[in-house]
Amino acid sequence: MLQLDQPALQARNRLLVMFVLLCVLDSALVILAKDRWAIGRILFTLVVMYFVLQGRKWAKWLLIGICSVLVVLLIAMVVALSSKLSTALLIGSLILSALSAMIVIYIIRSKDLSRYFAHKRQSHKRQSHLLD
């Protein structure tokens, strides 16, 4: 089995840190807003993130879609409800929006991360051939 190079592992680690930050910030905003329905969205996103880290292409594109919609909705919410939201929710929503955009850009543009995903997909193929 081929070993991953250090830059690919570092790219994976950076993505993992961004995922953790996104989940922690999103959870904090859910608690502040007392929006219990959003917990299901967070759990769904965590499951998708797991499959992204496993190198699944469908999960990568689904996460890009989730983060993109989150950016649009958060900015629209801040613009539409800025006078009704607390300062903490306003700032937190803008930070969450920026972090979501950073994740999308990083997933699409990082060549090291692409190498990591390709390696994960190849190792899945090898494992499935061994099981046949």
Image: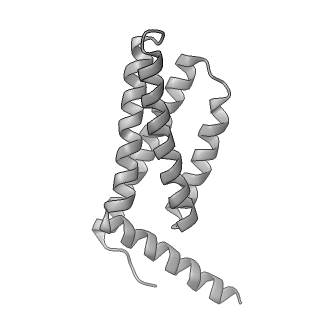
Say if 109 sits above or below 77 in the image.
below
Q: Given the current orientation, which residue lies at the most extreme right position?
A: 132
Q: Nearer the viewer, residue 1 or 33?
A: 33
Q: Work out whether 11 lies above or below 65.
A: below
Question: 104 and 26: which one is in front?
Answer: 104
- Asked where in the image residue 132 lies, by quadrant, the reply is bottom right
Whole-percent x, y for residue 78 in the image: 43, 22
Q: Quadrant of residue 91?
A: top left
Q: Is residue 31 left or right of residue 21?
A: right
Q: At x 63% / y 89%, what residue is drawn?
A: 129
Colour scheme of the rendered structure = one colour
Does residue 120 appear to the left or right of 9 in the view shown?
right
**Picture layout, residue 30 above or below residue 99:** above
Q: Residue 71: horizontal and vertical position, in percent?
A: 44, 38
Residue, x 37% and y 28% (percent of image)?
94
Please state the horizontal and vertical placement of residue 131, each as a whole percent of the image. Answer: 69, 86
Please give the count of numbered marks on the rendered protein: 0
